[in-house]
């Protein structure tokens, strides 16, 4: 796939307490493949540099990813690691560490380490020229719901007002990366979607992309994740 150069940041620093496998969720085995392998395969052949934010059992993740890359199963020019020693605090802390290490001169896509996406979805992000967020139409319980107007995000909220669910992938155009960095450092927010709300409130236009993902939070999610892999 030919496209403008992008950075891709994968957040894989947390403990994944609800899944409770004693490893980062990125190392969860699904149908004989670890979750990070499935993510990297969807990114393979794209014009991107990948940065993995690690924290909990970082050495295990580093070793597994490095071994997988050496196998030659994916074509990704650069994969780097960013260590977040404060990984137990919040995802916004991981955003701060990422933006302190990632060059801010090209568009950057942020992906949660427990999210599996298909190729079509990620292609839409590479093709978009705007700061964008991914939503899905099927809304789960206790979801962060998106209020959308004319294809633009109005607000993410937890009160059920909206027609789609935040799907934990966002892209920032170059002019908005510094705004994201400043918002992450100035805010007391703990969630990525709250930072996005702050940016929208400050006038940043955020495009909405609708796609399909599977999320791995608990053991019950493994069934849906397997079905998603089969659909891919």
Image (spheres, rainbow, N blue to C red):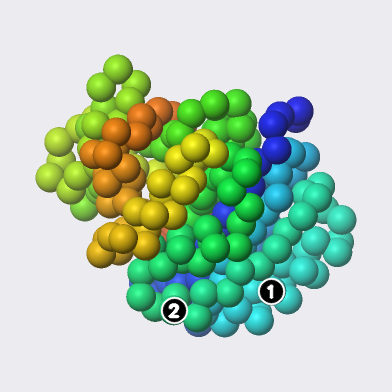
**Image check: 129 left or right of 207?**
right
Q: Give percent across and percent down for residue 177.
A: 49, 46
Residue 98 to residue 177: above or below: below
Residue at the (60%, 78%) spot, across then down: 58
Q: How many marks?
A: 2
Regarding mark 2 in the picture, which secondary structure is present there? loop
Residue at the (59%, 48%) spot, across then down: 104
Q: Earlier in the sequence, mark 1 or mark 2?
A: 1
For the N terminus, give its image quadrant.
Answer: top right
Residues 6 and 20: in front is 6
Residue at the (58%, 40%) spot, across then down: 107
**Image check: 35 left or right of 218?**
right
Judging by the rendered image, the residue that carries numbered circle 2 is 86
Quadrant in the picture for residue 62? bottom right
- Residue 62 shows which numbered tag? 1
Residues 87 and 32: in front is 87
**Image check: 198 left or right of 134?**
left
Q: Residues within 10 Å of mark 1 (few under 14, many from 20)?
A: some
- Distance from Cα at disc 1 to Cα at disc 2: 17 Å
**Farthest top residue?**
150
């Amino acid at each position: 796939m030919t496209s403008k150069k992008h950075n891709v940041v994968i957040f894989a620093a947390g403990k994944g307490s609800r899944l409770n496998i004693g490893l980062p969720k990125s190392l969860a085995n699904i149908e004989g493949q670890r979750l990070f392998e499935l993510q990297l395969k969807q990114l393979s052949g794209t014009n991107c540099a990948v940065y993995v934010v690690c924290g909990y059992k970082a050495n295990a993740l580093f070793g597994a990813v490095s071994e997988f890359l050496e196998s030659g199963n994916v074509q990704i020019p650069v994969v780097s690691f960013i260590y977040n020693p404060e990984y137990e605090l919040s995802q916004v802390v991981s955003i701060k560490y990422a933006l302190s290490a990632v060059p801010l001169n090209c568009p950057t896509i942020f992906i949660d380490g427990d999210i599996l996406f298909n190729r079509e979805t990620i292609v839409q992000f590479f093709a978009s020229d705007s700061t964008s967020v991914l939503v899905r139409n099927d809304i789960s319980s206790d979801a962060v719901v998106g209020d959308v107007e004319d294809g633009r995000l109005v607000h993410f909220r937890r009160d059920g007002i909206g027609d789609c669910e935040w799907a934990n992938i966002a892209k920032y155009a170059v002019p908005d990366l510094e705004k994201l960095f400043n918002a992450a450092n100035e805010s007391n927010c703990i969630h990525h979607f709250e930072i996005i709300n702050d940016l929208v409130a400050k006038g940043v236009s955020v495009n909405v992309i609708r796609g399909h993902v599977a999320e791995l939070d608990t053991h019950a999610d493994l069934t849906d994740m397997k079905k998603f892999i089969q659909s891919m």
